Image (spheres, helix red, strand yellow):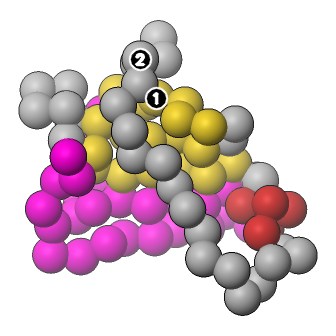
Amino acid sequence: MVQAANELKINYDRDADVLYCSFGEPQEAISVEADDGIIVRHNPETNAVVGYTIVNFFKRFADRPNQAVSVPLAETEAVA
């Protein structure tokens, strides 16, 4: 379940090549690696998805600029 929010906040760190996305204001969450370098963030109380992080974003998608980016949001085990 994705948390309902009025806006999607996106921040890209060019130096680290990491894309941060948050549904509403960023908040504390449990991080789960859903796929290699794709981290989904869950609210620890409701398990709702509150955001995600994509490591190596530019490297991963630069050669496919016209393709949609899929981010798996399925429930997985939390990363300690």
Residue depicted at 46% across the width and 29% down the height: 32
Give the x, y percent position of residue 41: 37, 39
Viewed as shown, does residue 64 lie left or right of 76? right
Viewed as shown, does residue 58 lie left or right of 28? right
* Magenta-highlighted residues: 1-29
Label 1: element kind? strand
The answer to whether residue 69 is magenta is no
Give the x, y percent position of residue 75: 35, 31
Residue depicted at 38% across the width and 39% down the height: 74
What amino acid is found at the position of numbered circle 2 in the picture? Glu
Residue depicted at 85% across the width and 62% down the height: 59
What amino acid is found at the position of numbered circle 1 in the picture? Val
Residue 40 vs residue 29, the one in the foreground? 40
Query: Which of the labelled discs sits on residue 42, or is there none?
Result: none
Give the x, y percent position of residue 42: 29, 36
Viewed as shown, does residue 38 lie left or right of 28? right
Quarter of the figure with residue 30: top left
Query: Looking at the picture, does residue 75 appear above or below residue 69?
Result: above
Q: Is residue 17 visible?
A: no
Mark 1 vs mark 2, CA separation in Å:
6 Å
Q: Is residue 60 visible?
A: yes
Query: Looking at the picture, does residue 2 appear above or below residue 41?
Result: below
Label 2: element kind? loop
- What residue would you read off at disc 1? 32
